[in-house]
Image (cartoon, rainbow, N blue to C red):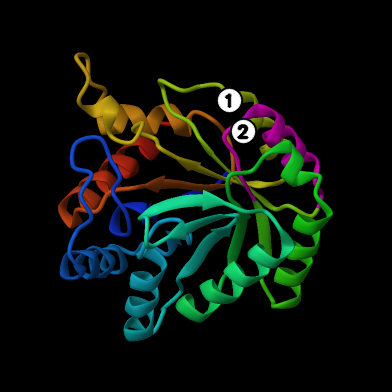
Amino acid sequence: MSVDFGLGLIGIGRPWGFADPEVPPEAQAMELLERALALGLTYFDTAPSYGVSEERLGRFLRGSGQPGVRIATKFGEHWDAARAEPFVDHSYEALARSLDVSLSRLGRIDVLQLHKTTPEALASEEVARAFEYAVSLGIGEIGASVSDLDSARLAIANQGFRILQLPYNAAQERFAGSIDEAAARGMRVAVNRPFGMGRMLYEERPISKVEAFRFVLQKRFDGVVLSGTKSPAHLEENLRAFEGALLLA
């Protein structure tokens, strides 16, 4: 099994995180992305509902030449800039419009996942049409980002889906079986929140980053583990912890 270390970019676009939820200035966001490329990271995960995340990543990639980078985004949850809050719309029109905007911002999309996935959305003909539209645009890897077990089960059963994103860590193990089922079907798995949005690092009995990554890597799957930091220094620290956990897994 092969698992890469990827960068989740919610933190550079909207308030997020346990210890420091503030959105960083543009210069810090660009420094984070530059450090990620310098460290050899090639998987970047964003979404329209991450505020200005897609726009910032797109501006960075246009200036960097995009060497070997895989761009993952989502559709289904959108961003209301006037209210500074997300909202969900799984209609075909909203999904197609969101995808067009994301493509204009990012230049290309390698991985597309349904956001705020529900069993109802997965059964929707409009969502199916939107994925057909995505495939017609040349997007090669589609799937779902899930937060409930029924959606995970249905996404794994969808033979057109090649990737499943879900939260998994030592404090939130309910998707353990979903990871096994997805891996057995040959899907790639993207694990997010390996530190529980950072909360696990600051609790009364904190877990080390190496231990947190090792817990995730005890599962056998092909895919990526996403670090959601917005600090260049923390990114490098997280990568070293991930590499240490790989040696122990």
In the image, taking residue 35 as reference, residue 79 lies left or right, namely right
Q: In screen coordinates, is 225 left or right of 90?
A: left
Determine which of the numbered discs, if any, sits on residue 176 in the image: 1
Q: Residue at x 49, y 41 (%)?
A: 191
Residue 26, placed above or below residue 202: below
Mark 2: which secondary structure?
helix
The amino acid beneath tag 2 is Ile
Q: In this view, does 232 lie above or below 70?
A: above
- Mark 1 Cα within 10 Å, few/some/many (few <14, many 20+)? some
Quarter residue 17 falls in: top left
Question: In the rendered image, which quarter contains the C terminus?
Answer: top left
Q: Which of 215 and 169 is in front in this view?
A: 169
Q: Nearer the viewer, residue 137 or 205?
A: 137
User: Residue most toward the front?
Assistant: 82
Q: In the drawing, what numbered circle is on residue 179? A: 2
Residue sitting at x 26%, y 23%: 207
Assess whether mark 2 and mark 1 are in contact (beta carbons under 8 angstroms).
yes
Q: Which amino acid does label 1 sit on?
A: Ala
Q: In this view, does 14 lie to the left or right of 88?
A: left
* 154 within the magenta span: yes
Which type of secondary structure does the marked residue at label 1 adopt?
Answer: helix
Where residue 41 sits, quadrant-wise, is bottom left
Which residue is painted at 50% across and 67% down in the image?
A: 70
Residue 237 % position (x, y): 21, 46
Q: Please state the extent of the stretch shown in magenta in the rendering.
A: 144-159
Q: Position of residue 85 (x, y in %)?
A: 40, 51
